[in-house]
Amino acid sequence: MNAAEPTRPMPARDLTPNIPEVVAEIAGLFERYEQALIDRNVEVLDNTFWNSPHTIRLANHEHGYGFDRIHAHRVARPPGPGHKEKRLRLDIVTLGHDFATVTLVYKVRGREMTGRQMQTWVRFPDVGWRVVAAHVSMIAEQPVL
């Protein structure tokens, strides 16, 4: 399809935003992931991400294109609290029962910087919820929240 062609209508799907039980499910998975970072629980970290060459995780010192590169970074990362000192804002947006984003803004430990983390979650029929794309960055500016 080229840009000039009109898109075909998609079949109707439920894209209701923020269904409470879906938000709660994602919140629990996100907290499990955050604890696994601290504990360096590679099994949980790996199970959070889609095992695919299409999965992407971009971070301060990582360009993880594909699950294998993301896994290699996980294995090399030391355990511990990392650079997150204090949460400033956490937003979870879900659409229907199978798509979600998580956005975390936090104070960077020991630095006058703000960290930002985003995850895109998809529920797969065979494996359940997985992160398909993620990004972590730091800025010197203090954001308006």
Image: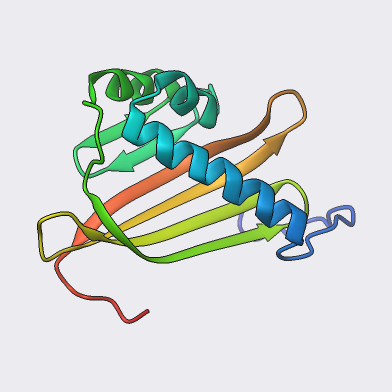
Residue pictured at 32% horizontal, 35% vertical: 38
Tell me which corner region of the image, top left, top right, bottom left or bottom right, holds residue 113.
bottom left
Horizontal arrangement in the rendering, residue 51 relative to residue 134 (left or right): right
Residue pictured at 74% horizontal, 61% vertical: 20
Residue 27 lies, with reference to residue 44, above or below; the image says below
| In front of the other: 112 or 66 | 112
Q: How many marks?
A: 0
| In front of the other: 136 or 6 | 136
| In front of the other: 25 or 98 | 25
Horizontal arrangement in the rendering, residue 105 relative to residue 48 (left or right): left
Residue pictured at 37% horizontal, 79% vertical: 145
| Residue 1 in view | no
Tell me which corner region of the image, top left, top right, bottom left or bottom right, holds residue 79.
top left
Q: Residue 140 appears at what percent x and percent y?
A: 14, 67
Q: Residue 33 appears at what percent x and percent y?
A: 47, 37
| Residue 142 in view | yes
| In front of the other: 101 or 110 | 110
Residue 86 lies, with reference to residue 123, above or below; the image says below
Residue pictured at 19% horizontal, 38% vertical: 61
* The residue positioned farthest toward the right in the image shown: 12
Tell me which corner region of the image, top left, top right, bottom left or bottom right, holds residue 77.
top left
Residue 61 lies, with reference to residue 97, above or below; the image says above
- Identify the image's colour scheme: rainbow, by chain, secondary structure or one colour: rainbow
* The residue positioned farthest toward the left in the image shown: 111
Q: Residue 41 appears at what percent x and percent y?
A: 40, 23
Q: Residue 50 appears at what percent x and percent y?
A: 55, 28
* The residue positioned farthest toward the bottom in the image shown: 144
